[in-house]
């Protein structure tokens, strides 16, 4: 007797059908009621929307100078460790990732 290994096993098929029936019979809300619930619970106090005026805000960033064992790639402009230097020509340095 030949065995079809692509066929779904009977126990798996029964479990799949039972799960599908459970999902279909569940009392799931319709799209309109979910939308209404979201509108009621949405609170926009203190939320800044895109395009808001941020001219009076300050950004504090600590700038760390480039180390002696680092270089700035002339292609991707990232600061890399000296071990990632692939080539240097005319004072420009290129990293391994940009040259590969």
Image: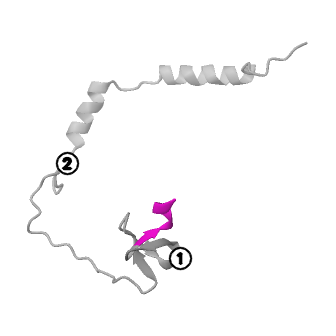
Would you say residue 15 sits in the magenta stretch? no
| Mark 1 burial class by Cα count in 10 Å: few <14, some 14-19, many 20+ | few
Magenta span: 93-100
* Camera-nearest residue between 73 and 40: 73
User: Which residue is farthest right?
Assistant: 1
Q: Is residue 74 above or below residue 61?
A: above
User: Which residue is farthest front?
Assistant: 90
Residue appearing at x 43%, y 80% in the figure: 70
Q: Is residue 11 above or below residue 100?
A: above
Residue appearing at x 52%, y 59% in the figure: 100
Horizontal side of 14 relative to 61 (left or right) equals right
**SS of the residue at dot 2?**
loop
- x, y (%) of residue 2? 87, 14
Q: Which residue is mark 1?
A: 83
Q: Is residue 74 above or below residue 32?
A: below
Residue appearing at x 16%, y 51% in the figure: 49
* Camera-nearest residue between 6 and 81: 81
**SS of the residue at dot 1?**
helix
Residue 43 badge: 2
Horizontal side of 29 relative to 61 (left or right) equals right
* Camera-nearest residue between 97 and 31: 97
- x, y (%) of residue 77? 35, 67
Residue 4 badge: none
Earlier in the chain: of badge 2 and badge 1, it is: 2
Horizontal side of 1 relative to 5 (left or right) equals right
- x, y (%) of residue 8? 72, 20
Q: Between marks 2 and 1, how big is the CA–CA gap?
A: 51 Å
- x, y (%) of residue 99? 48, 62
Number of numbered callouts drawn = 2
* Camera-nearest residue between 65 and 84: 84
Q: Quadrant of the N terminus?
A: top right
């Amino acid at each position: 007797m030949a065995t079809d290994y692509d066929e779904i096993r009977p126990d798996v098929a029964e479990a799949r059908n039972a799960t599908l029936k459970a999902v279909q019979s569940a009392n799931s809300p319709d799209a309109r009621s979910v939308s209404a619930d979201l509108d009621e619970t949405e609170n926009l106090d203190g939320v800044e929307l895109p395009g808001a005026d941020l001219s009076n805000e300050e950004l504090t960033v600590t700038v760390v100078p480039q180390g002696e064992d680092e270089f700035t790639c002339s292609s991707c402009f990232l600061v890399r460790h000296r071990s990632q230097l692939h080539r240097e020509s005319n004072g420009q340095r290129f990293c391994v990732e940009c040259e590969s």
